[in-house]
Image (cartoon, rainbow, N blue to C red):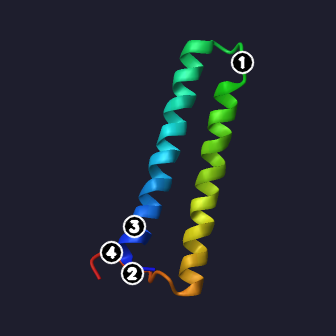
Amino acid sequence: MNDSLKTLVIVAFLIIILWNLGAGLYYMLVDKGRTKRTVNALTRRIALSVALILLVVLAIYMGWIKPHGIGA
């Protein structure tokens, strides 16, 4: 897997996470607690965040990405 694809996958995850965060805010303001759309959007955001963390940990373990220090 080349570096561009790895970066694209991570950025795509982050964009979808932010989209669900914005959707949760929008539903919270529009629905005023009458539906469960806010809870569903924020649940998806949490699930995607956990999936992204696990993906990064797996990629480090498998050697697909190499962690480095700041400024290294």
**In the image, what residue type sits under mark 1?**
Thr
For disc 1, the marked residue is: 35
Q: Secondary structure at mark 1?
A: loop
For disc 3, the marked residue is: 7
**In the depicted structure, whether residue 35 falls above or below residue 51:** above
**In the depicted structure, whether residue 27 falls above or below residue 45:** above
For disc 4, the marked residue is: 70
Q: Nearer the viewer, mark 1 or mark 4?
A: 1
Q: Secondary structure at mark 3?
A: helix
**In the image, what residue type sits under mark 2?**
His
Task: Kindly report the distance in space between the C-alpha atoms of the residues bearing marks 1 and 2.
Answer: 44 Å
**In the image, what residue type sits under mark 4?**
Ile
Q: How far across and how far down the image is residue 42, in percent?
A: 63, 37
Q: How far across and how far down the image is residue 29, in percent?
A: 54, 16
Task: Kindly report the distance in space between the C-alpha atoms of the residues bearing marks 1 and 4.
Answer: 44 Å
For disc 2, the marked residue is: 68
Q: Residue at x 63, y 57 (%)?
A: 50
**In the depicted structure, whether residue 29 falls above or below residue 49:** above
**In the depicted structure, whether residue 14 falls above or below residue 70:** above
Q: Nearer the viewer, mark 3 or mark 2?
A: 3
- Occupied quadrant, residue 35: top right
- Occupied quadrant, residue 4: bottom left
Q: How far across and how far down the image is residue 68, in percent?
A: 39, 81
Q: Residue at x 65, y 43 (%)?
A: 44
